[in-house]
Amino acid sequence: MEKKISKKKRAAILSTILIIFHFVQFSLAEESAGENKGSYLSVGVGLGIPYGVLGINLEFNPNLPAPIKENIHNYFSISIGVGYSPGGISYSVGLRGYPMGRRKFYQPRISGYYGTVALLKYASGDYDREDGFAFGGGVLVKFYKQFSLDFDALYIIPDDYTDYIKGSRLKISFGIHWHPQ
């Protein structure tokens, strides 16, 4: 059973990714020029929804206009994950909020994602991805200046096939991130 993504959904996902990469490009350009002292970027590998099941995650703060830019990097970031699952290429796009701000060691957060949230296994042994929303909380723990561990507990809300998904809707993810600044 091959699941097709509608043209409207595909266009929305592509537009979101292009806009995010546009912001990243300008944030990195300003950072390399030394103009954007408050930007934040990290790249990680891990397992779970933020990593596209098994893959990579990019977390960053976009370059915002001056009136709303002040200290926003301490409280919000955008997250993109791309990875592999038995159902094929998986993804996630989301927002992370740090209600207590960025700290040196321990950074609790709340998160919301849209992307691959579940896998369906058929009697034939084939898998199918199930896209949907995931919301929850987690923590980033820095253990060295440029490295951190990520842990999240997320509640999933699949778009379709909700009656066929077995087990808990609470999903755990973890990974390791590198912070280049």
Image (cartoon, grey):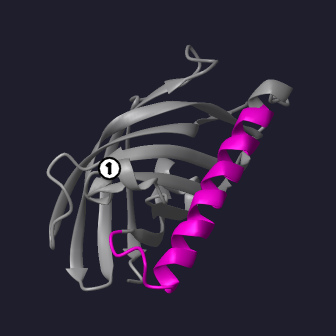
Q: Residue furthest top?
A: 163
Task: Classify 10 Å Cα crowding around label 1: few (below 14), some (14-19), many (20 and above).
Answer: many
In the image shown, does 28 or 103 lie closer to the viewer?
28
**Residue 27 is at least partly visible in this image:** yes
Q: Residue farthest to the front?
A: 67
* Residue 124 vertical placement versus 141 (above, below): above
Q: Is residue 136 magenta?
A: no
Residue 127: give x, y in percent of width and height. Answer: 72, 40
Q: Which residue is mark 1?
A: 152
How many callouts does the rendering have?
1
Q: Secondary structure at mark 1?
A: strand
Toward the viewer: 18 or 177?
Answer: 18
Which residue is at a point 21% across and 62% down the rendered structure image? 102
The quadrant of the image that shows the C terminus is bottom left
Q: Is residue 109 above or below residue 165?
A: below
Name the spot of residue 107 as percent of width and height, x first.
19, 60
What residue is rendered at 32% in x and 80% in y?
Answer: 147
Kind of residue at badge 1: Asp
Instruction: Give the image quarter of residue 167.
Output: top left
Residue 166 visible to an observer of this rendering: no
Q: Which residues are magenta?
A: 10-38
**Residue 63 locus on image (x, y percent):** 49, 60
Q: Is residue 162 left or right of residue 129?
A: left
Q: In the visual, does 64 lie left or right of 117?
A: left
Which residue is located at x 58 percent, y 59 percent? Answer: 23
Query: Relative to 65, is 35 above or below?
Result: below
**What residue is at 46 percent from the left and 52 percent from the top?**
78
Picture quarter with the N terminus: top right
Q: Nearer the viewer, residue 134 or 26?
A: 26
